[in-house]
Image: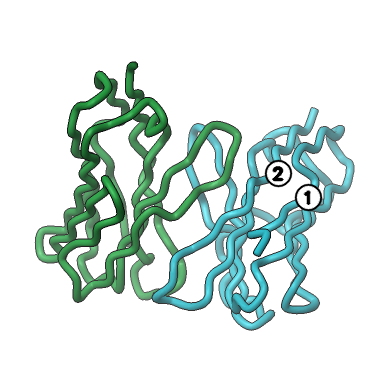
Amino acid sequence: DAGVIQSPRHEVTEMGQEVTLRCKPISGHNSLFWYRQTMMRGLELLIYFNNNVPIDDSGMPEDRFSAKMPNASFSTLKIQPSEPRDSAVYFCASSLGEHSPLHFGNGTRLTVT
Amino acid sequence: KQEVTQIPAALSVPEGENLVLNCSFTDSAIYNLQWFRQDPGKGLTSLLLIQSSQREQTSGRLNASLDKSSGRSTLYIAASQPGDSATYLCAVPTSGSARQLTFGSGTQLTVLP
């Protein structure tokens, strides 16, 4: 298996622009997570899906953030409009279940100028 | 609320040394504990997953222990190598959840050749 695949690897955009991050989980995994990592706050869970259904989005910082999972093999995280403080590395991760290891993608490094 | 602390924040050792990384958590009602490795510019790689009923797990030169009652885990690395240089993070389920993880801030390990 290719592992969790994220795109793009890097994204540089101007404040106010819409940003869409993409994720393909490992085939067969039923849970998908979006995390954000910064030096100041470490790894923070933004939202997670179980069987394509959003379970907990309490970590989503503001209404500017939204996430979808239209099918078992694809998820998006959208920021509209983006702000400089959104600059971070965004990770997608997937797992088979609550007693299984979490597998991470290589992340998308977002820079908002 | 689950809080995870890792000590030390950074560690530098000469090649060949055995070393121990520490992780403590505040809510001992956990389902499992995971240790991850993160290389610069990469995502997290799961190293070991210890279920709550287990006391330790081993993989090669790595051994992780879990003491739920005291809220502690250790990651033991035997005969360290320069390739072990990375940031090591531990994670436990967030209070009341089996799937959401709370991460420590990590220990940055440097093994000097």
Whether residue A97 sits left or right of residue A13 in the image: it is left
Secondary structure state at the residue bearing disc 1: strand
- The quarter in which the N terminus of chain A is drawn is bottom right
Residue B61: quarter of image: top left
Q: Which mark is residue A108?
A: 2
Q: Chain of mark 1?
A: A
For disc 1, the marked residue is A7
Q: Quadrant of residue B49?
A: bottom left
Q: Chain of mark 2?
A: A
Q: Nearer the viewer, residue B13 or A33?
A: B13
Query: Is there CB contact under 8 Å for labels 2 and 1?
Result: yes
What amino acid type should be assigned to the residue bearing mark 1? Ser
- Are discs 2 and 1 located on one and the same chain? yes
Colour chain A appears in: cyan
The one nearer the camera, B97 or A61, is B97
Image position of A79 with respect to B81: above or below? below
Image quarter of residue A37: top right
- Judged left or right of residue A40, residue A49 is right
Chain letter for green, please.
B
Q: x%, y% of residue A51? A: 64, 83
Q: As displayed, is residue B11 above or below residue B62?
A: above
Element type at marker 2? Answer: strand
The answer, for residue A57, to whether it is visible in the render is: no
The residues bearing labels 2 and 1 have C-alpha atoms spaced at a distance of 7 Å
State the residue at coordinates (49%, 33%).
A40
